[in-house]
Image (spheres, helix red, strand yellow):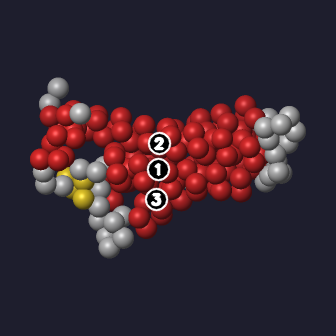
Amino acid sequence: MGRRTQRFLTEVAKFLTVGGVATAVAFVIFNGLVHGYLGGPGPMNDQPILAFVLANTVGMLVSYRGSRSWAFRHREAVGPAGGRLMFFAINLASMAIPVGCLAFTRYVLKLEDPLSDNIAANGIGLALGTAARFVAIRQLIFPHRAPVTPELETAGKA
């Protein structure tokens, strides 16, 4: 395997790991808000879209921190805010994909159970949204590799 391919696969693995942590955070918050944890419906049971957006906004903060400090730390960020504004814009735009899947399941198929919500939003929608985010973040926020320094070289071997 070539060095470029290996670096790319490492980025993908790190990006997916960070996304997995952020998704777990959002998953717990979303399900608590909509479906509750004590046997009854959650406080936002009748507002699943808003609950999903709120939960994933928290997940987005986790994702940015992990992407900046680990997954893409060897890449220079663009823009005066270190890519933050573009990162949040990309995430908000790509959130439309799982929100659309959740809305379709809830309002067209009339399925309101936890399994249907999670398959639609946190399964299908998040997989499609994650692929779109990876491409956009890598190309628009962290497009160039930073110069290799001894610290990055050593960190890459750990």
Q: Residue at x 78, y 38 (%)?
A: 37
Relative image position of residue 131 (x, y in whole percent)? 44, 43
Q: Residue at x 15, y 34 (%)?
A: 3
What amino acid does circle 3 point to? Ile
Relative image position of residue 98 (x, y in whole percent)? 60, 46
Instruction: Please name whichever residue, 99 or 63, is drawn nearer the observer in this view of the structure.
Output: 63
What amino acid does circle 1 point to? Ser
Q: Quadrant of the N terminus?
A: top left
Instruction: Please name whichever residue, 84 or 155, is drawn nearer the observer in this view of the structure.
Output: 155
- Which residue corresponds to mark 3? 90
Looking at the rendered structure, which numbered label has been put on residue 18? none
Q: CA distance from mark 3 to mark 1?
A: 12 Å
- Which residue corresponds to mark 1? 63
- Callout 3 environment at 10 Å: few (<14), some (14 to 19), or many (20+)? some
- Callout 1 environment at 10 Å: few (<14), some (14 to 19), or many (20+)? many
Relative image position of residue 67 (x, y in whole percent)? 38, 50
